[in-house]
Amino acid sequence: MKINKIFVLLLIASLSFGCDQETEQKEPNKFSGLWSLYIMEELNSETGVWSEWRDGMQGYILYDDKNNMSVHLTTTGYEDTDLRFPIFTDTISNEALKHLTNSYVYFAKYTIDEKQNVVEHARISHSNPGLWNEIVRRRFTFSGDTLILQPLEEKDAGLRLKWIKEPVSNKK
C-alpha cells in the first residue's frame, strides 16, 4: 500500500512537471517576420554624420522562427526599367548585366547572441558566387517596430540599415 501511494505521488508530480513545461511560454523571437528597408546609411568618418548610402536602397529582410533568413537589396527604383531579359541564358545585353549588379540577394541560417546584441548569418547561397558559405555578423538594436543592423566586417562597418516591421497580413 505504501508503494502504491509513492507511485501515485510520483505519477502526479511527473504529470504536473510535464504540464508546467507545456504551458511555459517561450520568449517570442523579435527578429521573426518580414522587414522592409527604411534607409541604408553610411557614416562619414571625418564628421561622424550618417547620410543615405549612394542614391538610396530598397529591399526586404525575412527571418523565420526556424533560424532561416533571406535578404534582397536593390537600388531605389530597380524594378522601374523597360529592360526585359531571359532567365538562365548567356545571351543577355551588357546593359541588362549592369542592371543585374544592382540586386543583392542571399539566404542564410541565423543565430542570435543576445549578450553581445549580434546576429550571425551563415550564408548558404548568394547572388555573388564568391560570397557563398561565408559567415557575417551584424550588431542589432530594436526601437519599436524598427530593427537596426550594422555590419561588423571591416569593409562594411560604416554602414547602418534600418528596417521597419511589416504588418502581419491574414489575407490568403
Image (cartoon, helix red, strand yellow):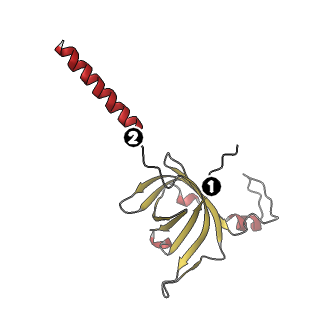
Query: Which amino acid type is shown beneath numbered disc 2?
Result: Glu
Q: Residue at x 72, y 66 (%)?
A: 78
Distance, label 1 to label 2, CA atoms, is: 26 Å
Q: Image quarter for residue 22?
A: top left
Q: Closer to the N terminus: mark 1 or mark 2?
A: 2
| Residue type, numbered disc 1 | Pro
Q: Is residue 60 left or right of residue 138?
A: right
* Residues packed near mark 1 inside 10 Å, few (<14), some (14 to 19) or many (20 plus): few
Secondary element at image label 1: loop
The answer to whether 23 appears left or right of 156 in the picture is left
Going by the image, does 22 lie left or right of 91? left
Residue 24 locus on image (x, y percent): 39, 40
Q: Nearer the viewer, residue 17 or 60?
A: 17
The single residue placed furthest to the right in the displayed view is 82
Residue drawn at (46%, 49%) of the image: 28
Numbered marks: total: 2
Asked which quadrant contains residue 137, the reply is: bottom left
x and y percentages locating residue 25 in the rendered image? 42, 43
Q: Residue furthest top?
A: 1
The residue labelled by disc 1 is 167
Residue 105 in view here? no
The reply, left or right, for residue 51 in relation to residue 101 is: left
Instruction: State the residue in front, 161 or 164.
Output: 164
> In the image, residue 158 lies at what x, y percent?
49, 75
Image quadrant in which the C terminus is located: top right
Residue 1 image point, x, y percent? 18, 11
Taking 42 as reference, is 119 above or below it?
Answer: above
Q: Which residue is mark 2?
A: 24
Q: Is residue 170 above or below residue 61?
A: above
Which residue is found at the position 78% from the left and 54% from the top? Answer: 86
Q: Which residue is situated farthest in the bottom direction here?
A: 47
